[in-house]
Image (tube, grey):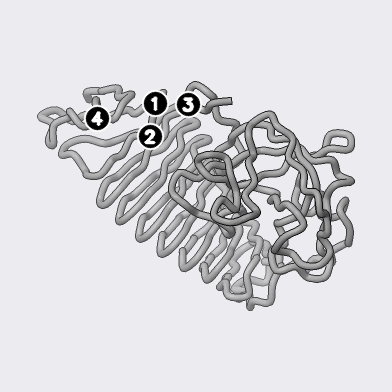
Amino acid sequence: MKVIEVHTQKQFDKLPDIFGEYTEIRITDTLETIYVDKARGNSSVVALDNSSVEAWDNSSVEARGNSSVEAWGNSSVVARDNSSVVAWDNSSVVAGDNSIVEARDNSIVEARDNSSVVAWDNSSVEARDNSSVEARGNSSVVAWGNVCIHGLSNFVTITLFAFAVCYKLAKFKVQKKSKTCTVIIPIYKKGTSAWLEREGIKSSGNKAILYKKVSKKFETQEDNNNKTLYKIGTIVEIKNWKPENDECGENKLHACSRPYFADEFRNNKGDRYIAIEVNIKDLYVWDNKPQFPHKVAFRKCKVLYEVDKFGHKLSIKKHGISI
C-alpha cells in the first residue's frame, strides 16, 4: 500500500482521480480546512492528528487522532480515537473509541465503544457498548449494551435494549425492549449551583468557564442596536442588568454550558465559538422549566480564547486569530 501525506488544499486537489496502486491519502497537521468532494479510485482518505476536513457528496473519510471532520451530502465518515465529527444532510458516520459526533438533518450514526453523540433534527442513531447520546429535535435513538441516553426534546424517539439507561428530561415516550433497561426521571434542584452541577461545569473558586457563538468578527447581535464585541482578552459587561424578566431578549448577556448548544441561537457562515470566564455571582438561572435548559444569563465576563464546537482550545497559528 502506498501512503501520501497532504497538508494543504492545493496538494489534495493535485491528486489523480484514480491511483494505479492502492493508496492511503493521509490529511495531517493542516493549517486550513481541506475539502474532500469526491471519492478517488483505488484509494482511501484518512484525517489524522490535528487536521480539519470537510467531506462532501459521495466522498468517504476516516477520522483518527484529534482530527475534526464535517460530513455533508451523502458522504461517509468513520470516526476513531479522539476525533470529532459533525454530520449533516444524508451523511453516514460510524463512531468508535472516544470520538465525538454531532448528528444533524437526516444523518445516520452508529455509535460504538466510548463514543459520544449529540443527535439533532431527524437524525438516527444506533448506540452500542459504552457510548453516550444526547437526543434532541426529532432524532431517533436505539440503544444497546451499556449505552446512556439523555432525552432533551418532547419529540425524540428512544428505544432501549439490554442494560441501556435513558435520562428522561422531556415529555417523550420510551420503548423498553428489555427488563434490564432503565428509565430515570431526574428531580432537579434549583439555583445557580444546581445548574452548574447539572450541566457538568467545572468551577474554579468563584468562577466558571462557559461558551458563546459569535460572528467572524467576534460580535453578537451585529445587525441591531444590541451589537456586542467579544474581543479575546477583553471584559464584556451589560449595564442595564435585568435577567429575571425573560430567558431571551435584552438586559442580559447569554452563554451556554457547551459550545454546540449555542447552535440553537445562531448558525451563520464564518461563526466562531469562544470560551468566557464568569463570576458565579454574575450568573442568573431560570428555575421554572426553562425553554433552553443549557442557556444561562450573565452580567459580566472575561473573553478567554476561541474553541471548536466541542470546547477544545484553538491555536492562534492555525486559525489566524488576531488578538
Check whether the beta carbons of the residues at disc 1 and disc 2 lie within 8 A of each other: yes
Which residue is disc 4 drawn over? 12
- Give the label on residue 33, or none: 2
Packing grade of label 3 (10 A; few <14, some 14-19, many >=20) is few
- Dot 2 amino acid type: Thr
Packing grade of label 1 (10 A; few <14, some 14-19, many >=20) is many
Label 4 residue SS:
helix
Determine the residue positioned at 21% across, 29% down: 23
Q: Earlier in the sequence, mark 3 or mark 1?
A: 1
- Give the label on residue 320, or none: 3
Which residue is disc 1 drawn over? 30
Q: Give above or below for 51 relative to 217.
A: above
Packing grade of label 4 (10 A; few <14, some 14-19, many >=20) is some
Label 3 residue SS:
loop
Q: Earlier in the sequence, mark 4 or mark 3?
A: 4
Q: Please name which of the two marks, 4 or 3, marks the residue nearer to the observer.
A: 3
Q: Please name which of the two marks, 3 or 2, marks the residue nearer to the observer.
A: 3
Q: Earlier in the sequence, mark 3 or mark 2?
A: 2
CA gap between label 3 and label 1 equals 13 Å
CA gap between label 3 and label 2 equals 13 Å
Determine the residue positioned at 84% across, 34% down: 204
Determine the residue positioned at 26% across, 23% down: 3
- Dot 1 amino acid type: Thr
